[in-house]
Image (spheres, rainbow, N blue to C red):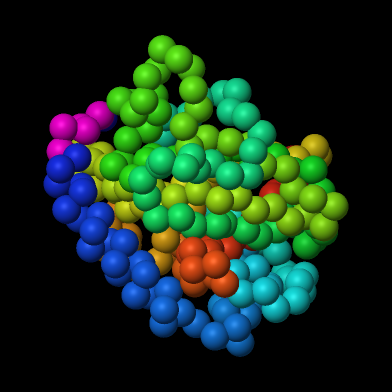
Amino acid sequence: MKQHDTRANRRVFLGGATAALLLHACGSASETEREQQAQGASSGGGGTVGGGGGNAGGGGDPVPLECTPTADNLLGPYYRAGAPFRDDLTEPAMAGTRVSVRGRVFGPDCERLAGAVLDVWQADDTGGYDNDGVGDPADGAYVLRGKIVSDAEGHYAFRTIIPGNYLNGAQYRPAHIHVTTSADGYEPLTTQLYFESDPYNAIDPFIIDSLIMNLSEGVNGELEAAFDFVLAPVPG
Ligand SMILES: [Fe+2]
């Protein structure tokens, strides 16, 4: 359901949300704590690393001991096929808090998956998608959409903005990034990545804890988040 007539309200909220996210980033977990979170997540939570494994803070690149396929999450109505390959979804004049998301793609035996394709799409700073009122749909431009390919070690990274919240029915959805991850020989995964400290996390009916990313502040002053994907094998 499209209810984008309340963007003014979202903007009021976003100021607080961004501040909360930044405050959280300043007090983010230590590398040791992150690694502990990673171990817990990888052994039972669905492959979320949340800053562990040397992603957000840069501290080595250990392979998890156990890889549970990442939880799937709804596709939603705003997917568009044909997004360009690029690792920076931002544009210079684009509003929004910059964040880099990085991590790895694994198979169920924790094997690194090179050449996996992440197809990413998200709302802009006001909570709107490019096929729902942002920009000019007639020009066919892809706004805040892109495909990213994992490297030989299974690493991926892309730069974007913290998405805005938008109404879904009677309540706002927490900020989230949609991702479909695919690799030859594995089941495609459609899911969403969320951000810790978003006040709507607590009331959202779709969110899954293992899909919530921690945030930290990178050396360039921009936010960083990390997430490792684990794909399931093709049945049979
Ligand atoms: Fe969405």
* Between 65 and 174, the one nearer to me in the picture: 174
Q: Is residue 77 above or below residue 189?
A: above
- Residue at position x 42%, y 61% from top? 195
- Residue at position x 70%, y 49% from top? 232
Q: Residue furthest front?
A: 92
Q: Is residue 153 above or below residue 179?
A: below
Residue 36 visible in this rendered orientation of the protein: no
Q: Position of residue 75 (x, y in %)?
A: 47, 36
State yes or no: residue 4 in magenta: yes
Q: Position of residue 17 (x, y in %)?
A: 28, 61
- Residue at position x 79%, y 43% from top? 115
* Between 29 and 99, the one nearer to me in the picture: 99
Q: Position of residue 104 (x, y in %)?
A: 70, 58
**Highlighted range, magenta:** 2-6
Q: Residue furthest right?
A: 152
The secondary structure making up most of the magenta span is: helix
Give the quarter of the figure containing the N terminus.
top left
